[in-house]
Image (cartoon, rainbow, N blue to C red):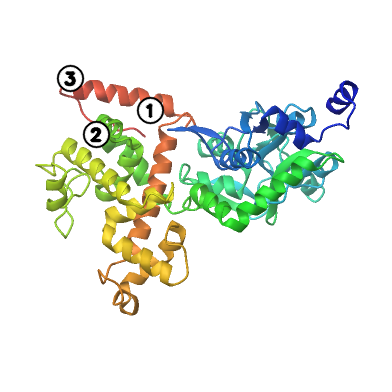
């Protein structure tokens, strides 16, 4: 229709899909509102698919117009009906989809996992789940897989949820015992497992399968070709690996016990200090949840915490650092939080300007733990060994070498427990991710939780009341 109208009003050939996008100055992309695709973060829109699509828009020199489909089946329908130029939603390349659509080159792989809740007997095959309540997302590749499996297991039945835009919602239902089982892809599970520590993988339903962007099937492949050029560039430049690390790299570092303890401490220890973290965040321009995650790693939000080396308080400041940051009493929660926030901001400003986010923040975190000098040694060593000293992923691989005499003897500051800052950064990234979820609309219990936060604030302001323990 678009090409025909163009041809009737001009004497030249119809423009290609790429030319239409360039002329319009924008590209329209349909996706999902989920933790693995596109959501509103503390500082604006974010998500793995969002960042990929935004990069493609920049690559073309146009604006990105991205929107979330109301229901999963709408994604392909919007591409088919020209409402969207393409879909960026982590969609699996399947034979049935390829009948009507074209896929970009793969940029990710995932397999399908059957999920159940701890406390139930682990299913070993589909015979074990027959009779249980299994629900999957309508229109997903999981339905295709189950239909094929039904030939072998004729008593296998399931329901399809049209209103579940992501596996995260169904995982929540399994965690709340509203469902017995669901199927999600391995990426969804890995990024959300810290939020649902009760969930377990029963068994995979498929091998690793490619994921790609979805385009209309047409003889005009200009837009898809441009997307393939862009994705190939991302892969060759290492940018794709950095994006994957940003969103998925540390998703599995907290085990069940660690996650449950963290959530329990969010509910019982964080509330008295929450307003001070928020205030410090506003003052320094650092996300308060990130500051809270640092504090949890340092002290588990225990104002009286003391390390064997003498650092103490919520942010575990040394005497020297406390004095530099104007902190008179390290055990005073408000002083400690503001002092720690100013110190982290100072460390981040010391990182060379050419280093971009999020690596800049990871380097500053490592400095908070091991010291700026040791970080610089690790960066120097990384460069000497032929790797990128401005890449956190490269430097984190070389930090543990600071504990080996062969390497630290060549460096200015000598020995350091180089594995420690690697674990430190990984843990804070995990705590930060869980805390963002706990305090956001992605958590179905967030509104109820916020009410309890407000109640606690009122109690603190009135000068009394016990800490509210939330389940």
The image's mark for residue 273 is: 2
Can I make out residue 143 in this image? no
The image's mark for residue 449 is: 1
- Secondary structure under the numbered disc 3 in the rendered image: loop
**Residue 386 picture location, percent across and down:** 47, 70
**Residue 429 picture location, percent across and down:** 40, 48
The alpha-carbon separation of the residues under discs 2 and 3 comes to 15 Å
Q: Give the farthest residue toward the bottom.
A: 406
For the residue carrying disc 2, how many other residues have a C-alpha within 10 Å: few (<14), some (14-19), or many (20+)?
some
- Secondary structure under the numbered disc 2 in the rendered image: helix
Taking depth in this image into account, of 456 and 156 the one nearest to the observer is 456
**Residue 274 picture location, percent across and down:** 28, 32
Q: Which callout, 2 or 3, points at the residue further toward the start of the chain? A: 2
The alpha-carbon separation of the residues under discs 2 and 1 comes to 16 Å
**Residue 460 picture location, percent across and down:** 20, 25
Q: Which residue is mark 3?
A: 462
Residue 291 as seen in the image, left or right of residue 207: left
- The residue located at (29%, 43%) in the rendering is 345
Q: Which callout, 3 or 1, points at the residue further toward the start of the chain? A: 1
For the residue carrying disc 1, how many other residues have a C-alpha within 10 Å: few (<14), some (14-19), or many (20+)?
some
Q: Which callout, 2 or 1, points at the residue further toward the start of the chain? A: 2
């Amino acid at each position: 229709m678009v090409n025909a109208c163009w041809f009737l009003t001009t004497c030249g050939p119809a423009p290609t899909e790429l030319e239409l996008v360039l002329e319009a100055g924008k590209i329209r992309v349909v996706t999902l509102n989920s933790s693995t695709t596109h959501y509103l973060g503390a500082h604006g829109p974010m998500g793995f698919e969002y960042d990929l699509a935004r990069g493609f828009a920049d690559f073309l020199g146009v604006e990105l117009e991205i929107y979330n489909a109301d229901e999963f089946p709408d994604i392909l329908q919007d591409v088919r009906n020209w409402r969207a130029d393409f879909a960026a939603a982590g969609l699996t390349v399947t034979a049935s989809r390829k009948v009507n659509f074209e896929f970009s080159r793969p940029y990710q792989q995932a397999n399908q996992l059957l999920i159940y809740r701890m406390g139930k007997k682990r299913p070993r095959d589909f015979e074990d789940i027959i009779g249980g309540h299994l629900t999957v997302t309508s229109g997903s590749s999981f339905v295709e897989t189950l239909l094929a499996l039904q030939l072998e297991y004729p008593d296998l039945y399931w329901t399809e949820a049209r209103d579940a835009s992501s596996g995260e919602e169904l995982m929540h239902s399994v965690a709340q015992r509203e469902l017995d089982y669901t199927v999600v892809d391995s990426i969804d599970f890995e990024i959300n497992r810290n939020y649902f520590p009760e969930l377990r993988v029963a068994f995979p339903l498929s091998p690793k399968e490619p994921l790609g962007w979805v385009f209309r099937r047409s003889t005009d492949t200009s837009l898809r070709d441009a997307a393939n050029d862009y994705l190939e560039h991302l892969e060759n430049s290492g940018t794709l690996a950095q994006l994957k690390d940003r969103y998925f790299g540390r998703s599995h570092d907290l085990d069940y016990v660690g996650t449950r303890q963290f959530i329990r401490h969010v509910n019982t220890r964080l509330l008295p200090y929450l307003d001070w973290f928020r205030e410090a965040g506003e003052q320094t321009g650092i996300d308060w949840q990130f500051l809270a995650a640092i504090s949890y790693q340092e002290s588990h939000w225990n104002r009286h915490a003391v390390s064997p080396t003498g650092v103490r308080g919520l942010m575990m400041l040394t005497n020297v650092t406390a004095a530099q940051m104007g902190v008179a009493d390290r055990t005073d929660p408000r002083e400690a939080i503001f002092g720690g926030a100013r110190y982290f901001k100072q460390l981040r400003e010391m990182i060379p300007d050419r280093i971009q986010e999020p690596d800049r923040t990871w380097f500053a975190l490592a400095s908070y733990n091991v010291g700026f000098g040791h970080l610089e040694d690790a960066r120097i060593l990384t460069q000497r060994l032929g790797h990128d000293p401005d890449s956190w992923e490269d430097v984190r691989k070389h930090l543990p070498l600071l504990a080996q005499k062969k390497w630290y003897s060549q460096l200015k500051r000598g020995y350091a427990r180089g594995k420690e800052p690697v674990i430190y950064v990984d843990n804070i990234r995990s705590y930060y991710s869980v805390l963002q979820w706990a305090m956001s609309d992605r958590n179905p219990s967030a509104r109820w939780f916020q009410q309890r936060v407000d109640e606690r604030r009122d109690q603190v302001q009135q000068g009394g009341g016990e800490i509210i323990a939330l389940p």
